[in-house]
Amino acid sequence: MNHRSRVRPRALGAATSVLCLAACPPSEGQALRGAPGVSVFSAEFALDEPVVAAAPGDAPALGFSGDQCLAVWRDFRTLRPQLRGARIGLDGELLDPSGFLVRDVADSYSVPSVASDGVDFMVVMPSVDGPIHATRVLADGTVPDLDGVLLATGGWLGALEFDGTDFLYAWTGAPGLHVARLSPSGQVLATGEEPVLADISPSSLDIAFDWQHHLVVWQREAGFGSRVVEAARLGLDGTLLDPVPITIDPFSGMAGPVVAFDGVQHVVVWGRNVEGDPEPDKLMAARVTSAGVVLDPGGLLIAEYDGEFDGFSRIDVIGNGLGATVAWSRDGSDDGGDFWLAVETARIGLDGAITRSAPLPGARGIDVALAGHGSDDALLAWSAGGSSPDENFAPIFGLRLSSSSGAAIEPSPRRISGHANAQEVRAAASDGDDFLVLWTDTRDLASQGRDLFATRVTPAGVVLDPAGIALPGHVDDVDVVFDGQNYWIIGLQYFNDSDQQSRAVRLRPDGTILDPKPLPLPMCEAFPAAARGDAGVLLLGPSCEYDPQVGYHEFAAILLDGAGALSSVHWLSEGPDDSMIREPALASHGDGFLAAWIFHDTIFGQRLGPTGAPLGPRFVVVPASPGVAVSDLSLQFGADEYLVLWQDTLGLHATFVALAGPAGASPVLSLAPPEVLTDGWGCSRFAGACPKAVFADDRFLVTWRAGAGGSMPASLDLAVAELDPSGALRGPVALSAAPESEGAAVLAVNDRGDVLATYSRFVADSAVSSRRAHARILASPPDLAAGASSSGGEAPSTSDELTTSATSDPTSSGELPTTGGSDGTAVPTSGPSEPVPDDLETTAAGAPSGAETSAGEPQQFASSGCSLRRDSRPPWLLALLAPLARRRRRAST
């Protein structure tokens, strides 16, 4: 939440009843305003120095070439699944610290397979009933073709093996068992479109090679809630040798099976749990000869567990000529949420003897994978996390194991998936001069991305805390307001304790933390809205007053004094319907507030006095429409009215609410159509328009997240536009349009009218390879009559001094970038260094209004076949605005 805007004179402009950008996504590289044609945003700058951290991922798979391992996994650093890889030396050294891209799109529900021909690697990533591709990874980590080669047009689960000459990939189709063969160079030798074994629908599958035959094992439903583990042998050319499958376990029902060749026979491992059986969950194994004979018809017991809620997550097995090593993990869910348990290992001797290995140090997680060959040590990998996992912050870790015992041979796990610490910008505010930006950070794995950091930024773009200020506590939601003396940083961590109580940390403008232990606030259950008024900081949302008879927290407005104590409490509604209130929003005009919230897809409002007392009944701001879902509510005060922003299934909209008088009289403005927005139940890192606004220099600046089209665009960009209190709109233009999806932008304005726009975006540079916090400065426009010079003169509306290059790379020349200062001069912008490729730089910039293009036409905002002509103010309008601009300057000083 930003420092509240001062009341300013209403801008001149024609009244507009409805303004719709029906098919116009943001145009990149255009100016908004200031003097006509002047670029308004500074070059982008980073907010802190990157540090090494673990990258999020799951579903690891390993392959061994003889002198190194290749790990591949589904990676989520870009907020969408990609297939990434990294090489690991025999000594455990990570050869690719940030990993590399193996395939740009990875299915969210499938597990990759890796095998090696002894030098290079082959990786196969199936998809849910979609095409299956194979991708070569060379020994030096090079991926010759990210598109890979097409193995099949559709399939499900599968497994890959090398037989000494070619690769063989077996997978389940619809229905049936399919087999494809391809050469080490990636040439497809047999497509396998026709099943080798029809009329089966396995739920899992694995494959191993014994130098004579391939053995494929699977699990399938056998009716009445039971499952059966079966196998079949394949010849070198993929020919089916067992038309009648080999039964290994007729009473399965859990994880697996997996298979490996131990030098003498195949070893099959699976989980057993028959539905309705009171016996414990069991991890079983059986040996199978090259002739297809099952040596252990009843199975060998490896481990059993009595846990009521937990079960086997994933199992893997490898052989080394001396026996087999088995690894497994368990997870589950109960009333306390999800939990992960320890990763465990065991050895199976050639004679079938089972030896449980010693506990592995620091190994907790799911999705285990093993790799190794001969007498060399094995590598174990898993998706790591604490006892309460979050898939978005669960990196891949590894540990080397002894080939003879399966025990760890190093003291602690090694990180496999890595990048620079990822940042998600969450909030920003101003103390009237400088800005404060908050972000959550992944540098500490234990916090799972809930660590909170801050930095202060000057109006010139100088980052005052390049290492960041580490704030106490962990948060899922956070906001910040300035109360005239200190910043109030208000956060909530869900499921942190039974009451889900919000807490606050006060921070001085000099960066001093006043509350090493966060202060408890009288708001519980859901994150409150906050705003500063003349009487103090007001909170809006569910209070900690719980009524057990109706089962809800009472909805209230609570005023805090400067020390965090309750000053006044006002109940805004009564009854069980309080539990259905969503997304409370709050803004202040100084001696009063406007509260708003969503209830059954109706946006309600209520005017509040200086202490939060209701000044009248609640009223409807926007009525519900049949079949239209409403979310992403946001408020901002400016001039003499409140701006209300929201997203619904019909697009992104805005309307105004006056300080007094009837509500709902203002028209609804359409800012963006639904086809460029993502569906979402509220703003998140993955979805939602997440609109925000500030009021500066007689107009609102509005930003939101949009895409190029479709219900879920592959890349979400940030749009920004100017909205006059009269309803006239300029823009939108691109605030950031980097590859991958930007996070929601946050705006803050200081008393001078300078605006900070800050957001997170993905930096593809291999030294970073993560989502990082960035910012731009929009300087207050110069005096339109006196110009930028303190000695007077003509307004330099097209002066190079006032034009900041939108596409300049701050690292290209070694010089600090500049941003237009409020006096029209170029001001150095200093921030932490961060490698940023040229093609990732986008800034709103443009030529003077009416500038000629190569075709001789006035420059336009143009995108997707539509155009909005740039606003051009005639000289007589500039003359009328000049006295207002001079008075505003004198008033602000």
Image (cartoon, rainbow, N blue to C red):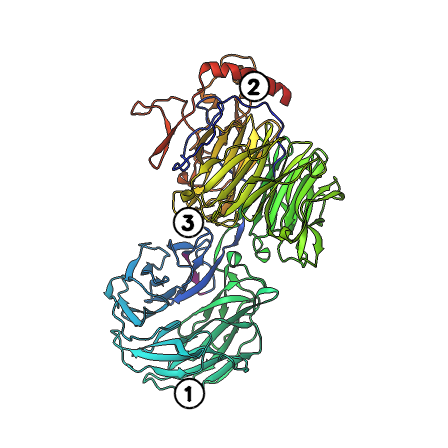
x%, y% of residue 543?
69, 50
Disc 2 marks a residue whose amino acid type is: Ala
Which residue in the protein does label 2 denote?
885
Q: Quadrant of the C terminus?
A: top right
Q: Earlier in the sequence, mark 1 or mark 2?
A: 1
User: Of residues 282 and 661, which is closer to you in this image?
Assistant: 661
**Left or right of 105: which side holds 671?**
right
Disc 1 marks a residue whose amino acid type is: Pro
Q: Earlier in the sequence, mark 3 or mark 2?
A: 3
Q: Which mark is residue 712?
A: 3
Q: Nearer the viewer, mark 1 or mark 2?
A: 2
Q: Is residue 85 magenta?
A: yes
> SS class of the residue under badge 3?
loop
Which residue in the protein does label 1 denote?
297
Disc 3 marks a residue whose amino acid type is: Met
User: Of residues 63 and 170, which is closer to you in this image?
Assistant: 170
Q: CA distance from mark 1 to mark 3?
A: 50 Å
How crowded is the residue under tag 3: few (<14 C-alpha within 10 Å), some, or many (20+)? Answer: some
